[in-house]
Image (spheres, rainbow, N blue to C red):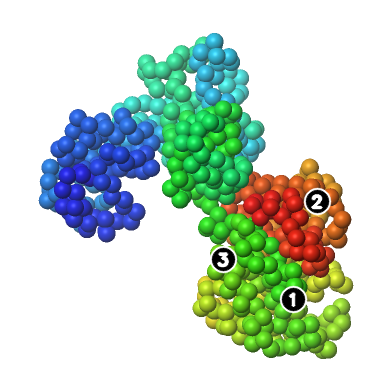
């Protein structure tokens, strides 16, 4: 809106702002980046736009604005009248207005495949002197991935391999935007889902990808663009790419943001691998830079830090794909122990971690049911960690209720009838415990039991059948929800791996009532890691567990509430450091937004059998401690 007499213009627009969702008011185009908005409604008042043309100004300066809605209004009163007409018609952009054209569209290509990561493999090249000629761009795909329509239009051709163009199997879609023709060719397909003559919309599935490389070719007939030996009127598709909610994510932590694109430039700040950054450049040109040596990309962080970062340390994502499972919280954390003198570190020692996890022990190893005493043990510690910014997970187990009770011992001889008695008492106790903590804004998550799928006779856990665990989870979930509607409630950590563990998890979901669903699946992938860490990955790659447990509740995050190295206190600290930091980096980069928590077991050596971040004298263990706390 115009800068002169701005508050009068704003008052005229206020009813419109209140009537429609997501309206952002920008005061004057001068100094403001309209590229952030796909649709701009521009008030064309005198002395506001270059040459008094809102459309010309926006098209020249803001290449990422797709649609421009121009309202010619010389005064605030005239603007108010136009906007009131739109409010009355529930027509935000005046699309039903029969007056002269005021909505103008730009032709854009959205990303045409479901394959991830979003990656440009090869650029357009119409000059033989620059190497191999390429009439389109090649983008990363996957065999059988869906290929989507990048721009709405009419299907004008389907071609098999061996065609006159020399293409692989392809589909062509012709679009018309502001009286211009554009033909988009998707090459490298199979199993087409459309026919010649079909009208297709943006985002509609056209076919499956034949392999890992999809080529997109753009023409602007009748007489524009470059000419290749078998195809003419060709343009670089890069210049038309628009990726809704486009973001980039660093591949490394503490990536430096510089004032200008140079390694010698002033450092303005740092960004981390879990940060979502907004590219401040054209999407297509940004895609060409990502992963390329000596290329720089201008970005803005969520905190407002602007500058240039090394594009070879960036990957593409979107707001929804890259969003943190718990916004603003680093998923990395550590298990603590209220009973261990070394398991209660001062919060100042925990660096950049996001989570701490305690086992919630009421029994006091003797069958106690004194929940007031348990609250007294945990409350001062939890208050201190929460005040320092850390999030809290409480893991319940047989130590919450059951341990030291003669009617349940030995655990290996538990029957369904005994489990029914324990479950009833456990759920009642959890209602009282949750009530103690509700309203304090201290506990973020309750974890129901621990390693319930372990083999009978497991040392540190008490297993049960999936049917009995479903009874426990359902009753305990109802008990906690009766007193606290906001806290997260997740499963105990499955320890059976991608086979037996995920099967147990699926049985749990099947046995639960329809109105009960966990807020996440937790698992403990001891003995799993990366291919470069075979010594600590004796049971296989971490991907196998991620895929298997993700499939149980695909729409909910995963929680690694225990992971690390067990029973190897004399391992080389450098090997442990590499294992821990590479695992965190790998999961953050390859599964952005998938993990709510990645909680190491344990803080101190001597906390049961975990490899501690500090030694038995409470001293840091370089380089592990510093590396982990900054991960």
The spot of residue 518 in percent (x, y) is 62, 68
Q: Is residue 29 above or below residue 335?
A: above
Q: Is residue 130 above or below residue 83?
A: above
Point out residue 536 in the picture as x, y percentages from the top left corner: 82, 51
Other residues around mark 2 within 10 Å, as few (<14) / some (14–19) / many (≥20): some
Question: What label does residue 388 carry, if any?
Answer: 3
Q: Secondary structure at mark 2?
A: helix
Residue tagged by mark 1? 339
Q: Nearer the viewer, residue 489 or 229?
A: 489
Q: Earlier in the sequence, mark 1 or mark 3?
A: 1
Question: In the image, what residue occupies the spot 52% across and 77% down?
Answer: 440
> On residue 172, which mark appears?
none
Residues 348 and 334: in front is 348
Which residue is identified by label 2? Answer: 573
| Residue lying at 27% horizontally and 59% vertically, measured from the top left | 18
Q: Is residue 362 above or below residue 559?
A: below
For marks 1 and 3, give the CA distance. 21 Å
Q: Is residue 484 visible?
A: yes
Q: Is residue 397 left or right of residue 195?
A: right
Residue 498 sits in quarter: bottom right
């Amino acid at each position: 809106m115009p800068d002169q007499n701005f508050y009068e213009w704003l008052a005229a627009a206020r009813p419109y702002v209140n009537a429609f969702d997501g309206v952002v008011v920008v005061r004057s185009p001068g100094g403001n980046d309209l590229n952030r908005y796909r649709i701009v409604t521009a008030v064309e008042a005198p002395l506001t736009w270059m040459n008094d043309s809102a459309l010309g100004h926006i098209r020249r300066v803001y290449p990422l604005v797709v649609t421009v809605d121009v309202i010619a209004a010389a005064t605030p009163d005239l603007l108010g009248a136009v906007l009131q007409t739109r409010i009355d018609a529930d027509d935000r952009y005046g699309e039903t207005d029969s007056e002269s054209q005021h909505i103008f569209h730009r032709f854009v290509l959205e990303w045409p495949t479901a394959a991830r990561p979003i990656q440009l493999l090869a650029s357009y090249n119409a000059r033989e002197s620059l190497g191999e000629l390429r009439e389109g761009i090649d983008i990363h795909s996957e065999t059988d991935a869906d290929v989507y329509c990048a721009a709405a239009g009419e299907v004008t051709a389907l071609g098999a391999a061996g065609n006159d163009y020399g293409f692989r199997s392809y589909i062509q879609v012709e679009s018309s935007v502001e009286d211009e023709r554009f033909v988009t060719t998707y090459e490298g397909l199979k199993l087409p889902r459309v026919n010649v003559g079909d009208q297709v919309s943006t985002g509609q599935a056209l076919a499956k990808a034949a392999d890992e490389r999809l080529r997109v070719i753009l023409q602007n007939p009748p007489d524009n663009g470059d000419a290749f030996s078998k195809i003419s009127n060709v343009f670089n598709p890069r210049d038309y790419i628009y990726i809704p909610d486009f973001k980039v994510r660093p591949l490394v932590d503490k990536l430096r943001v510089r004032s200008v694109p140079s390694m010698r430039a002033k450092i303005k700040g740092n960004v981390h691998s879990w940060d979502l950054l907004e590219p401040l450049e054209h999407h297509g040109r940004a895609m060409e830079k990502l992963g390329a040596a000596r290329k720089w990309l201008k970005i803005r962080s969520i905190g407002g830090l602007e500058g240039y970062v090394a594009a070879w340390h960036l990957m593409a994502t979107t707001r929804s794909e890259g969003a943190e499972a718990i916004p603003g919280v680093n998923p990395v954390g550590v298990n603590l122990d209220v009973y261990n003198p070394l398991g209660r570190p001062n919060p100042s020692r925990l660096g950049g971690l996001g989570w701490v996890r305690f086992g919630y022990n009421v029994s006091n190893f003797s069958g106690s049911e004194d929940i007031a005493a348990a609250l007294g043990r945990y409350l001062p510690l939890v208050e201190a960690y929460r005040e320092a910014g850390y999030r809290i997970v409480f893991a319940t187990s047989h130590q919450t209720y059951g341990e030291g009770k003669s009617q349940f011992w030995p655990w290996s001889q538990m029957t369904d009838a005994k489990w029914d008695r324990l479950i009833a008492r456990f759920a009642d106790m959890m209602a009282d415990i949750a009530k103690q903590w509700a309203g304090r804004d201290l506990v973020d998550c309750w974890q129901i039991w621990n390693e319930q799928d372990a083999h009978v006779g497991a040392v540190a856990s008490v297993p049960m059948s999936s049917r009995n665990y479903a009874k426990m989870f359902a009753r305990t979930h109802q008990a906690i929800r009766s007193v606290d509607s906001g806290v997260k409630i997740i499963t105990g950590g499955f320890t059976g791996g991608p086979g037996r563990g995920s099967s147990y998890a699926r049985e749990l979901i099947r046995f639960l009532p329809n109105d009960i669903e966990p807020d996440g699946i937790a698992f403990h992938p001891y003995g799993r890691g990366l291919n470069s860490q075979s010594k600590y990955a004796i049971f296989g790659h971490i991907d196998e567990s991620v895929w298997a447990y993700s499939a149980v509740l695909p729409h909910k995050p995963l929680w690694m509430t225990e992971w690390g190295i067990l029973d190897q206190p004399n391992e080389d600290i450098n090997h442990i450091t590499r294992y821990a930091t590479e695992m965190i980096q790998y999961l953050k980069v390859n599964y952005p937004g998938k993990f709510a928590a990645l909680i190491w077991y344990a803080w101190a050596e001597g906390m049961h059998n975990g490899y501690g971040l500090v030694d038995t004298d409470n001293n840091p263990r370089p380089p592990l401690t510093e590396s982990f706390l900054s991960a």
